[in-house]
Image (cartoon, rainbow, N blue to C red):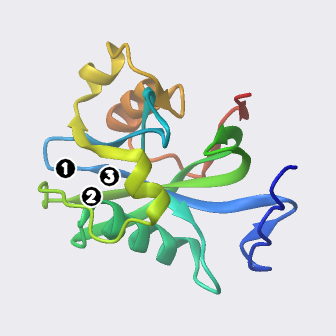
């Protein structure tokens, strides 16, 4: 028998999608911070992704972005900028399908040391660490990175600056 889904707080989901705030965190050398994640019971199925997570209670996406950044990386000295990109995605993780509406915020920091300070139990089982990446490293990476076109998006961001309005990325569906 399948487990019953746990209902979310009414304002966490919008149109059936989990509201998520992600952070494109850049250091003074324009490196981006990515987290290394994997399936909780299968460390061999891994990927890299930006810090961030679901909006909780009545917090704004901006508040969620800064809270998640602090919890997942220990970085609290970051200047949050504009929303760069928006993406809808669906993917299997930890035994369920996640359907999300993600907003990616630009942020800059001089604080490059990381230490996860408040991971959830699921995050403790599925996040293996963090790493700063140069754009060149991302362009040549053989690892799986989400969103899948992050290297090109970062190159455009570094070359042209933030877009005038958030760019809607292609929907990504992983089964």
Residue 105's spot in the image, x, y percent? 47, 57
Circle 3/circle 2 CB separation < 8 Å = yes
Describe the element under mark 2 as helix, strand or loop: strand
Taking 2 as reference, is 62 left or right?
A: left
The residue sitting at the bottom extreme is 58
For image coordinates 58% across by 79% down, the residue present is 60
Circle 1/circle 2 CB separation < 8 Å = yes
Describe the element under mark 1 as helix, strand or loop: loop
Q: 10 Å neighbourhood of mark 1: few (<14), some, or many (≥20)?
A: some
Describe the element under mark 3 as helix, strand or loop: strand
> Which residue is the site of mark 2?
108
Residue 161's spot in the image, x, y percent? 38, 43
Camera-side residue of 17 and 83 = 17
> Which residue is the site of mark 3?
25
Circle 1/circle 3 CB separation < 8 Å = yes
For image coordinates 27% across by 60% down, the residue present is 73
> Which residue is the site of mark 1?
27
Taking 156 as reference, is 173 left or right?
A: right
Label placed on residue 120: none
């Amino acid at each position: 028998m399948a487990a019953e889904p746990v209902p979310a707080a009414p304002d966490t989901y919008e149109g059936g999608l989990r509201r998520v705030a992600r952070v494109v965190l850049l250091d003074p050398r324009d490196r981006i911070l990515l987290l290394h994640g994997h399936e909780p019971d299968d460390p061999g199925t891994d990927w890299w992704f930006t810090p961030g997570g679901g909006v909780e209670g009545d917090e704004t996406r901006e508040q969620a972005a800064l809270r998640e950044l602090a919890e997942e990386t220990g970085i609290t000295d970051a200047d949050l900028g504009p929303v760069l990109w928006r993406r809808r995605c669906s993917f299997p993780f930890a035994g369920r399908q996640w359907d999300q509406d993600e907003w990616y915020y630009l942020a800059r920091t001089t604080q490059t040391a990381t230490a996860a300070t408040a991971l959830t139990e699921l995050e403790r089982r599925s996040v293996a660490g963090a790493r700063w990446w140069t754009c060149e490293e991302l362009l040549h990476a053989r690892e799986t990175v989400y969103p899948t076109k992050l290297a090109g998006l970062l190159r455009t961001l570094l070359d042209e600056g933030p877009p005038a309005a958030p760019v809607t990325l292609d929907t990504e569906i992983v089964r």
